[in-house]
Image: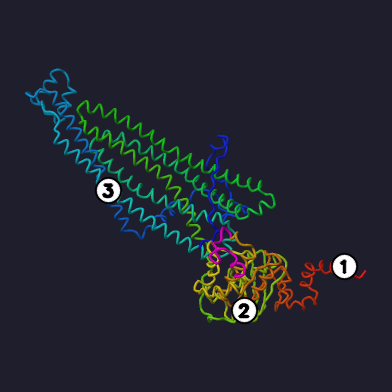
C-alpha cells in the first residue's frame, strides 16, 4: 500500500508572458538573485543558493561510481563500442574503393582500347591537358574497359556487411548499457528509500516535502537519463573522433588539418556555453523543487486555503515560483540550444573548405576520387561525434547537477547510531520513568529542562497544557523520534537508548490527531498494525473498537477500498480504524495524541469507548485539550514551558486551584455560569 497523502507532487509547467529583455538575463546574476530559498520556501537546503554543481568532477566521479560493480558488463560494452567504431571507420574507405571502380570504369570506357594507359597519358600531355594526365597517372584506369561489376558487387557487399555488423555491436552495447544503468538506478532508489528511513524526524520538520520528493523523483530520473544517453555516446563519440582523425590523416594530411580546425573552435563553444548552461540547469532543478513544494502544500491544504479565501495569495505565490522555474528553464534551454547551431555552422565551414580543396586535389591528380569521397564522408562523420559530444555535454551537466542534489540528500546527517545493549521481553509492564530529561530543538530556545516523573504499569497518564508547552514533544521523546540533550528515559528499568529503535517502537502504539490511512481496503488498514494477525483477531479488534458497527453497513464491508485520503468514510470512522490498527498491534505502551479533537460529540462517545478498550491493561499517555476526556486519568501532568507544574488526579488538581484549575475553568466556567443562570430563572 502506498500512502496517498505522500503522493509525489506533479511538476506544473505553464507559459508566462515576458518581455524579451527580461529573458535575456546574465546567468551569473540570475543564479544568485532569481532564486534564493528562504524559510518561507521551507526548502530542505534553503540556505544553499542555486548555482552550478559545487564540485563537478567529484560529483561526476561519484556518479560513475554507481556503475563500479558492473565492471564485466562495462567491459563488454567497451569492446562492443570499439568493434562498432572500427567497422564504422573502415566503411568509408571500402566505399571509396567502390567509387574508384565506378570512376575508373566510366573513364576507361571513354578511352580507345587499342592504347595503353601510358600512351593515353603521353597523348594528353602532348595536347597540354596535364591535369587529366596527372589524374590518369594516379588511377587504375584501363583504356577500353568499363565498370568491373564483379569487383563493385563484392565491395558493396563488404560495405553493407561492415555497417550491418557495426549496427549489431551498437545495438548490443546499447542493450547492455540499459541493463547496467537500470540496475544502478534501482540501487540508487533503494539507497534513497533506505536513507529516508534513517533520517531523523527534524529533517522532515525543517524541510518541504515537495523539495524532498523532487530530489528523490525528478533528480533521480534526470540522473538516469544522463547515464543512459550520455555515457555510451560520449565513449563512442571519443573513439569515433580518434578513428576518423587517424583515417583522415592516412587519406590526406592536408585536408585533415582543415577538418581539425573545427576541434578548437568546438572546444571553445562547449567550454563557454556548457559552463553557463550548467549553472542554469542547476537553477532549473532548484526551482523545480521549490515549485513542487508549493504545489504539494496547495493540494494538501486546499480546504484550508479555500476556507480562508487565500486562493489569490496561493496563486500569486505559485506564479512567482512558476515564473522562477520558467526563467530558469528558458535560460538553460536557450543556452544549450545555442550550442547545436553554432557547432553546425563550424561544421559547414569545415565542409566547404574540404570540398573545395579536395576537388582541386582530385582534378590535379593528387588524390583519387574514391579517396576524396571517403574523406568527405570521414569529415561529415567526424563532425557528428563533435556535435553529439556538445549535446551530451549539456545532458551530462544537467545530470551531474541532479546527481549532486541526490548525493547531498544521501549525505544528510542521519539519526544517532544505535547502541543496542539490552532487549525487552515479549510482554513488557510499561513502567516509564523520566529522569532529569532536558531537550530543545535549538540550543538558544530551551524547551524541556530537568523533567522527572514516573508512569506506573497500566496507568493512564494525561498530559495537558497550553500550546507549545511540550506535550507532543514529551511523547516523541519516548518514541525516540528525537534524542535527549541530557537525562534518561527508561522502559521497565531499561534505558531506551540501549534498545534498538525498532524494538522500542514495537512496544508502543500511537493514535494521532490526524487519522492517517493508506491506499487499500479497510481490512488492510487494520491489518497494518500487525501483518501476522489472523482474520479472527482482526475481526475481534474491529468489534472491540466499534469499527464493525459502521463497516457492516458498507456495501463492500471490510473490502471497501478507501479513496484519496479516506474521503469515503467520516473523520470519526477514520479515527476508529486507526484505533483498531493500534489495538491489533497489542502494544505495551499506548500514546493517544489529541485522538478525539477532530470528531463530533456523538462520535466522540464511540471513540472514547474504543480508546477505553484499547487502554485496558496498558500504560497510556493521553494528550488532550478537551479536559472532559481525561477526568478519569490516574495521573494528570500539567505542563507549562517544558516543565511539569502540577500533577495529580482530576479532583485533587481542581481543589488545588492552580494551573489545571485555570485551564479547566477556561473551558467549563461559561457552561457552569449558564447552568446557574437557568436554575435561578426557573426558581423565579
Is 525 left, or right, of 619 in this rendering?
A: left
Disc on the earlier residue, 3 or 2: 3
Q: In the picture, residue 506 is in which quadrant?
A: bottom right
The residue that mark 3 highlights is 168
Question: Is residue 358 positioned above or below 413 on the image?
Answer: above
Q: Is residue 307 visible?
A: yes
The residue that mark 1 highlights is 677
Query: Where residue 578 sits: x, y (%)?
Result: 59, 68
Nearer the observer, 625 or 489: 625
Is 319 left, or right, of 642 in this rendering?
A: left
Query: Where residue 162 sits: x, y (%)?
Result: 23, 43
Task: Tell me the SS state at disc 3.
Answer: helix
Foreground label between 3 and 1: 1
The residue that mark 2 highlights is 618
Nearer the observer, 219 or 397: 219
Extent of the magenta region: 547-565
Tag of residue 467: none
Magenta stretch contains residue 451: no
| Cα–Cα gap, marks 3 and 2 | 69 Å
Which residue is rendered at x = 34% and y = 53% of the image? 177
Task: Tell me the SS state at disc 2.
Answer: loop
Amino acid at each position: 500500500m502506498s500512502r496517498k497523502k505522500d503522493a509525489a507532487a506533479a511538476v506544473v509547467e505553464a507559459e508566462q508572458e515576458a518581455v524579451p529583455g527580461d529573458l535575456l538575463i546574465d546567468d551569473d546574476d540570475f543564479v544568485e538573485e532569481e532564486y534564493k530559498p528562504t524559510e518561507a520556501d521551507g526548502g530542505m537546503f534553503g540556505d544553499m543558493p542555486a548555482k552550478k554543481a559545487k564540485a563537478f568532477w567529484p560529483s561526476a566521479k561519484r556518479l560513475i561510481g554507481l556503475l563500479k560493480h558492473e565492471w564485466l558488463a562495462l567491459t563488454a560494452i567497451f569492446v562492443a563500442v570499439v568493434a562498432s567504431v572500427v567497422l564504422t571507420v573502415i566503411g568509408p574507405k571500402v566505399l571509396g574503393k567502390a567509387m574508384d571502380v565506378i570512376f575508373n570504369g566510366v573513364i576507361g570506357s571513354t578511352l580507345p582500347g587499342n592504347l595503353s594507359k601510358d600512351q593515353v597519358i603521353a597523348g594528353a600531355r602532348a595536347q597540354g591537358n596535364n591535369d587529366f594526365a596527372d589524374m590518369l597517372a594516379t588511377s587504375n584506369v584501363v583504356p577500353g574497359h568499363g565498370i568491373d561489376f564483379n569487383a563493385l558487387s563484392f565491395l558493396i557487399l563488404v560495405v553493407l556487411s561492415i555497417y550491418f555488423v557495426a549496427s549489431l555491436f551498437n545495438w548490443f552495447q546499447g542493450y547492455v548499457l540499459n541493463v547496467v544503468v537500470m540496475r544502478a538506478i534501482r540501487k540508487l532508489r533503494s539507497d534513497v528509500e533506505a536513507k529516508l528511513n534513517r533520517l531523523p524526524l527534524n529533517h522532515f520538520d525543517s524541510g518541504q516535502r515537495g523539495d524532498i520528493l523532487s530530489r528523490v523523483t525528478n533528480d533521480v530520473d534526470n540522473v538516469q537519463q544522463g547515464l543512459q544517453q550520455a555515457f555510451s555516446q560520449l565513449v563512442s563519440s571519443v573513439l569515433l573522433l580518434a578513428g576518423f582523425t587517424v583515417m583522415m590523416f592516412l587519406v590526406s594530411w592536408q585536408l585533415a588539418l582543415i577538418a581539425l580546425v573545427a576541434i578548437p573552435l568546438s572546444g571553445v563553444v562547449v567550454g563557454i556555453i556548457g559552463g553557463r548552461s550548467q549553472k542554469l540547469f542547476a537553477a532549473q532543478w532548484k526551482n523545480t523543487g521549490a515549485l513542487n513544494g508549493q504545489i504539494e502544500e496547495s493540494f494538501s491544504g486546499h480546504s484550508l486555503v479555500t476556507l480562508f479565501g487565500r486562493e489569490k495569495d496561493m496563486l500569486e505565490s505559485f506564479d512567482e515560483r512558476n515564473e522562477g522555474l520558467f526563467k530558469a528553464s528558458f535560460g538553460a534551454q536557450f543556452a544549450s540550444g545555442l550550442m547545436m547551431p553554432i557547432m553546425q555552422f563550424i561544421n559547414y565551414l569545415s565542409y566547404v573548405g574540404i570540398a573545395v580543396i579536395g576537388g582541386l586535389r582530385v582534378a590535379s591528380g593528387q588524390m583519387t576520387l574514391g579517396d576524396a569521397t571517403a574523406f568527405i564522408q570521414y569529415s561529415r562523420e567526424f563532425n557528428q561525434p563533435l556535435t553529439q559530444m556538445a549535446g551530451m555535454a549539456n545532458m551530462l551537466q544537467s545530470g551531474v547537477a541532479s546527481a549532486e542534489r541526490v548525493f547531498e540528500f544521501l549525505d544528510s546527517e542521519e539519526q544517532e547510531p544505535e547502541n543496542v545493549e539490552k532487549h525487552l521481553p515479549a510482554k513488557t509492564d510499561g513502567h516509564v520513568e523520566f529522569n532529569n530529561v532536558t531537550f530543545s530543538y535549538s540550543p538558544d530556545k530551551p524547551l524541556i529542562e530537568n523533567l522527572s516523573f514516573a508512569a506506573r504499569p497500566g496507568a493512564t497518564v494525561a498530559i495537558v497544557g497550553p500550546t507549545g508547552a511540550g506535550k507532543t514533544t514529551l511523547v516523541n521523546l519516548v518514541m525516540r523520534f528525537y534524542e535527549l540533550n541530557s537525562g534518561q528515559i527508561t522502559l521497565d528499568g531499561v534505558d531506551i537508548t540501549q534498545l534498538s529503535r525498532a524494538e522500542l517502537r514495537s512496544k508502543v502504539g500511537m493514535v494521532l490527531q490526524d487519522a492517517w490511512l493508506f491506499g487499500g481496503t479497510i481490512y488492510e488498514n487494520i491489518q497494518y498494525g500487525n501483518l501476522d494477525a489472523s482474520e479472527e483477531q482482526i475481526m475481534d479488534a474491529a468489534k472491540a473498537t466499534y469499527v464493525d458497527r459502521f463497516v457492516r453497513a458498507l456495501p463492500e464491508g471490510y473490502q471497501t477500498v478507501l479513496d484519496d485520503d479516506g474521503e469515503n468514510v467520516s473523520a470519526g470512522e477514520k479515527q476508529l480504524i486507526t484505533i483498531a490498527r493500534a489495538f491489533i498491534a497489542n502494544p505495551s505502551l499506548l500514546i493517544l495524541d489529541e485522538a478525539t479533537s477532530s470528531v463530533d460529540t456523538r462520535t466522540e462517545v464511540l471513540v472514547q469507548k474504543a480508546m477505553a478498550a484499547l487502554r485496558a491493561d496498558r500504560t497510556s499517555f493521553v494528550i488532550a485539550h478537551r479536559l472532559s476526556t481525561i477526568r478519569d486519568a490516574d495521573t494528570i501532568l500539567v505542563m507549562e514551558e517544558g516543565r511539569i507544574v502540577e500533577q495529580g488526579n482530576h479532583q485533587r488538581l481542581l481543589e488545588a486551584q492552580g494551573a489545571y484549575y485555570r485551564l479547566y475553568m477556561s473551558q467549563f466556567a461559561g457552561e457552569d455560569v449558564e447552568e446557574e443562570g437557568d436554575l435561578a430563572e426557573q426558581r423565579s
